[in-house]
Amino acid sequence: MSMSGAALQASAPAQERVPGGRSSLTRSRVRSAWIFVAPTLVVLALIAGWPLARTIWFSFTDASLNSLDDYQFIGFENYLANYDGEWLGLLTDPDWWHSVWNTVWFTGVSVSIETVLGTIVALILNASFPGRGLMRAVILIPWAIPTVVSARMWNWMLHDQFGVINDMLLRLGLIAAPITWTASPDTALWTVVMVDVWKTTPFMALLILAALQMLPGDIYEAAKVDGVHPVKVFFRVTLPLIRPALVVAVIFRALDALRVFDLIYVLTANSRDTMSMSVFARQQLVDFQEVGLGSAASTLIFLIIALLIVIAMAAGRVRPSGEAR
Amino acid sequence: MKILARIGFWLLVAGIGLFSIFPFYYAVISSFRSGNDLFSVAYLPERLDLSNYVAVFERQPFGTNILNSIVVAASVVALSLALGITAAYAFGRIRFRGRSLLLMTILAVSMFPQVAVLSGMFELIRGFGLYNTLPGLILANLMLTLPFTVWVLTTFMRELPKEIEEAAFVDGATPWIVVRRVFLPLMMPAAVTTGLLAFIVSWNEFLFALTFTLTNERRTVPPAIALMSGSTAYELPWGTIMAASVIVTLPIIALVLVFQRKIVAGLTAGAVKG
């Protein structure tokens, strides 16, 4: 209705200060703007805002999965409760804290490795050599393979008896006996990190490459003429220039790593040694049917990630921008 | 010295290439081996035994799983683009109060951990009677694709020159006509990029698909592959799993190789310039 009115108003310039009827046009455009964003806002409120609110609400109840409508408000008891002097609840659960530690460790180690390797790959792809386009396509393959599928591929490669990784290492004489990569507590989390590095380094490399390609070429000409060593050029010139892009890439990767689920769930199932926060929350919710407790874990994950976003944005003073996972 | 550096460079390139491709290569080789062959390691293809590929469709409704994935991903892409382009027009071309706040909110949604909405989404989907149905998954996946679709399309929309719609407005066109006649054709490249990304996200989505479906016939590909099991828990049908993996990965790899430039543009839109 108001959209068809726009044409009428536009052709009737009147008492407005700006000549040509621009401000009535502006007003009708503002009105149409709200109509244009309304569907998206409604959908997002329904499928993101509402479920989030309900999850937070459930975290204060004793709901269970098979009786979602029949629950009681129990306050903070899912988080922390005191029964006869004994503290109970999520915040006292060692398994929860273990999963928090796993997630933080996984995020720190994998994102660090991916940043360094991603930078190296980006520098290589930024050099001109025959087959560069092919190389750029090839490194996208790990990124494009569905996480579940790559986890299964690595499961098979890492198989303790028939796996190709053990076979290679045995042939090379690097290990004396086959390793149970995903089951042994010493190697399980490192294995998860390795697969994640394999899968997400390309993403890092592409973001960094895009930053590298926007750098002005003349700086490098000058450095070359002056005979500055390439390593020095990298640390003194390139790195400071791509720093903003690097910070953004690291933040996005870290946020992604903090909510890791697929990879760990498929690679090592519900093993305590590798359980991430998301795997913990889902286990409570679905496997144990404890919607209250699981929602409490979900709410804490949300708060932790929200807090880290605020800290990261304040510390890096970066304006975040859109990208896909 | 120069030659050594050259050799080192090429070794590095070869190493990265090998590391990237080997797991997929190994999955392809394994998918052509069956029975006791799998209990020995092979680095080179020996023969073309397609029995795993037959088994994957015979032993379970893998064809249905693929169809489910296609239906879900295509619907998610269509809905995300329809909603995204209209919203992006308003966000990208019209100044209005609350615009940046709304954009930031939408960005915040794209950072939601999936598990944070899991129980609420479960209740919602069950409330609509959509548990264990494809529309339920489509609805849930929109949460993952819509925010970045709006965001990336807004970035593209902003970069178009200002004069474009002014001429149309002077001629008396309504905003709706401007979006449909002027921006839709101009946005096609950006829509292809974001559509591809949304397709990949939906195609790969696992947590929602695992939680909101119950029966094997309603599953999409990722949970179907993750839950594939053999006659006993200790005897996984690795050959069949690898065959299924190859089948669902090939179209994605083909898409990525064909649209490589577009995908990279979409991934880096905004993220770097921001």
Image (tube, rainbow, N blue to C red):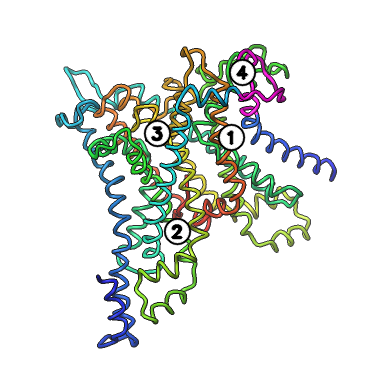
Q: Is residue B49 magenta?
A: yes
Q: Are marks 4 and 3 on the same chain?
A: yes
Evaluate whether label 1 is on the same chain as label 2.
Answer: no
**For mark 1, what is the residue?**
A198
Residue mark closest to the camera, 1 vs 2 = 2
Respond whether the residues carrying marks 4 and 1 are from the same subunit: no
Q: Nearer the viewer, mark 4 or mark 3?
A: 4
Q: Is residue A56 above or below residue A25?
A: above
Who comes first in sequence, dot 4 or dot 3? 4
Please tell me in which quadrant of the rendered image residue B18 appears: top right
The residues bearing labels 3 and 2 have C-alpha atoms spaced at a distance of 26 Å
Give me the disc on residue B153. Answer: 2
Q: CA distance from mark 4 to mark 3?
A: 30 Å
Circle 4: residue type: Ser
Return the residue at label 3: B207
- State the separation of the CA atoms marked 4 and 1: 27 Å
SS state under label 4:
loop
At horizontal 33% and vertical 43% (from top left) the residue drawn is B139
Q: Identify the residue under disc 4.
A: B34
Q: Nearer the viewer, mark 3 or mark 1?
A: 3
| Amino acid tagged 2 | Leu
The crowding category of the residue bearing disc 2, from other C-alpha atoms within 10 Å (few below 14, some 14 to 19, many at least 20), is many
* Labels 4, 2: one chain: yes
